[in-house]
Amino acid sequence: MLGLARVFAEVLATDASAEQIRNARPHPRVRYAVAPAETSGLADHSVQLVTVGQALHWFDIDRFVPEVDRVLVPGGIVAAWCYQLAVVSPDVDRVVRELYTLTGPWWPPERALLEAGDRTI
């Protein structure tokens, strides 16, 4: 969010977790609020950019999409990203993949969405 504050005059950062918001770094152009993505509390057509970092797979997409349509200005942008397993070196990558495969049965089902790069959402 702090990077966005260098470009935008006002940034509203929301998270459903009050703990996350409590631990956020203050910035004069960033306003923090506790709110789920599906009911942001923002005014209609009030934002130019909606960003989602490493969280889209947790959202109720059937409720999130209409909320984004409601809050974005015409021509507004949605930018969502997620990370994959890190690539370090063949030896390290092999160990990480083995551990990842071993722990696979305990990952939540939403992890499959990340593995697909959120492209299946």
Image (cartoon, rainbow, N blue to C red):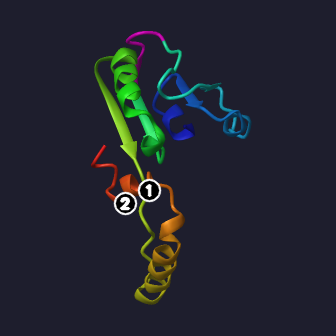
Residue 57 against residue 74 in the figure, above or below: below
The x, y position of residue 101, in whole percent, is: 45, 75
The part of the image, by quadrant, that contains residue 66 is top left
Q: Are marks 2 and 1 in contact (CB under 8 Å)?
A: yes
Residue at 36% over, 28% down: 62
Residue 18 against residue 40 in the figure, above or below: below
Front residue of this view, candidates 30 and 119: 119
Residue at 53% over, 32% down: 5
**119 to the left or right of 81:** left
Q: Quadrant of the C terminus?
A: top left
The part of the image, by quadrant, that contains residue 106 is bottom right
Residue at 44% over, 51% down: 110
Region in magenta: 43-48
Q: Amino acid at mark 1?
A: Arg
The x, y position of residue 65, in whole percent, is: 35, 27
Label 1 secondary element? helix
Q: CA distance from mark 2 to mark 1?
A: 6 Å
Would residue 88 be counted in the magenta stretch? no
Question: Which residue bears the numbered disc 2?
Answer: 115
The part of the image, by quadrant, that contains residue 18 is top right
